[in-house]
C-alpha cells in the first residue's frame, strides 16, 4: 500500500469500546500502515545499525478484557522477540504518535546499559536535540522534553528500579501536519532513528 500518513480515524481507534472491536480496528486501520512504514525505512535502518532488523507488530495477546490504549511496531535484531533487547518503536496513543529508542523493563542487562549511559551522559546531551523527549514508562502516555528532564536522575532510576525504563525520541501531536503527510513522517522517522542510533549501538556492545 502507499503510505499517506495517519489520519483522524486512526487515532479515534482508541475510543472504540470493547476489546474485540478495538483490536479489529487496530488490525484493519493501523497495522497495515506499520507494515508500509517498514518497507520504506528498513533498508536505511539496517544501514545505520549495521545488521539486519526485524519488524514486530504488537499483538496485545495477553489482553482478555480491557482494550489497548495504544499500539506500536518495534524493530529489533532478534526476529523472535524485541522486549529483552534495545529496540526502536513507532506507535500511537489516542492523541499522539511516538518514535522511540526503547529500553523496557524486560531488558536483562539494564544495569550495565544504564551505567554506560551515565558514564557517557555529556555525550548523550550533546547528541540529542532539544526537541526530543524522554519517557520512563512505555505503558503511560507520558513524556517530558529532554530540556526539562534530569537525565542523570532518570538513568539512575532506570538502573535501580526493577520496572524502570528509558525511552528517548520524539512525539508528535495527532493534529501535527507531519503525522498526516506520509513522506514527511517517513523522513522524521528516519531522522529520529539516525539521531538516537549512537545510543543504540553503544548499548549493543
Image (cartoon, helix red, strand yellow):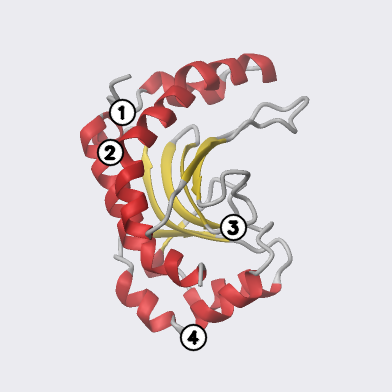
Q: Mark 2 — residue?
A: 185
Q: Mark 4 — residue?
A: 119
Answer few, some or many: residues within 10 Å of disc 3's Cα (few below 14, many 20 plus, some between 14 and 19). many
User: Which of 147/33 is in front?
Assistant: 33
Q: Say which element carries label 3.
A: loop
In the displayed structure, does residue 138 sit left or right of residue 6? right
Residue located farthest toward the bottom when viewing the structure as drawn: 119
Position in image of residue 185 (x %, y %): 28, 38
User: Which of 35/18 is in front?
Assistant: 35
Nearer to us: label 2 or label 3: 3
Position in image of residue 155 (x %, y %): 56, 73
Q: CA distance from mark 4 to mark 2?
A: 33 Å
Answer few, some or many: residues within 10 Å of disc 1's Cα (few below 14, many 20 plus, some between 14 and 19). some
Nearer to us: label 4 or label 3: 3
Position in image of residue 159 (x %, y %): 64, 74
Q: Mark 3 — residue?
A: 85
Q: Earlier in the sequence, mark 4 or mark 2?
A: 4
- State if disc 3 and disc 1 touch (CB < 8 Å): no
Q: Mark 1 — residue?
A: 5
Q: Is residue 67 above or below residue 189?
A: above
Image quadrant assignment for residue 41: top left
Q: CA distance from mark 2 to mark 3?
A: 25 Å
User: Which of 24/146 is in front?
Assistant: 24
Of the 4 image quadrants, the one containing the N terminus is: top left
Q: Residue at x 36, y 51 (%)?
A: 46
- Residue 144 appears in view: yes
Q: CA distance from mark 1 to mark 3?
A: 28 Å
Q: Residue at x 51, y 81 (%)?
A: 118
Q: CA distance from mark 1 to mark 4?
A: 38 Å
Amino acid at each position: 500500500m502507499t503510505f499517506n500518513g495517519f489520519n483522524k480515524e486512526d487515532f479515534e481507534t482508541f475510543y472504540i469500546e470493547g476489546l474485540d472491536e478495538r483490536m479489529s480496528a487496530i488490525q484493519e486501520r493501523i497495522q497495515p500502515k506499520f507494515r508500509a512504514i517498514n518497507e520504506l525505512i528498513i533498508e536505511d535502518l539496517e544501514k545505520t545499525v549495521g545488521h539486519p532488523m526485524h519488524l514486530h507488530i504488537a499483538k496485545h495477546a495477553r489482553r482478555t478484557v480491557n482494550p489497548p490504549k495504544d499500539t506500536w511496531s518495534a524493530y529489533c535484531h532478534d526476529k523472535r522477540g524485541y522486549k529483552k533487547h534495545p529496540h526502536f518503536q513507532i506507535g500511537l496513543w489516542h492523541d499522539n504518535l511516538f518514535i522511540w529508542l526503547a529500553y523496557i523493563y524486560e531488558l536483562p542487562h539494564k544495569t550495565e546499559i544504564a551505567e554506560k549511559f551515565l558514564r557517557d551522559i555529556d555525550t548523550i546531551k550533546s547528541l540529542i536535540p532539544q526537541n526530543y523527549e524522554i519517557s520512563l514508562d512505555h505503558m503511560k502516555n507520558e513524556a517530558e522534553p529532554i530540556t526539562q528532564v534530569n537525565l542523570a536522575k532518570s538513568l539512575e532510576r532506570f538502573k535501580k528500579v526493577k520496572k524502570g525504563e528509558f525511552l528517548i525520541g520524539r512525539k508528535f501531536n495527532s493534529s501535527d501536519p507531519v503525522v498526516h503527510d506520509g513522506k514527511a513522517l517517513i523522513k522524521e522517522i528516519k531522522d529520529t532513528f539516525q539521531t538516537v542510533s549512537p545510543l543504540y549501538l553503544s548499548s549493543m556492545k
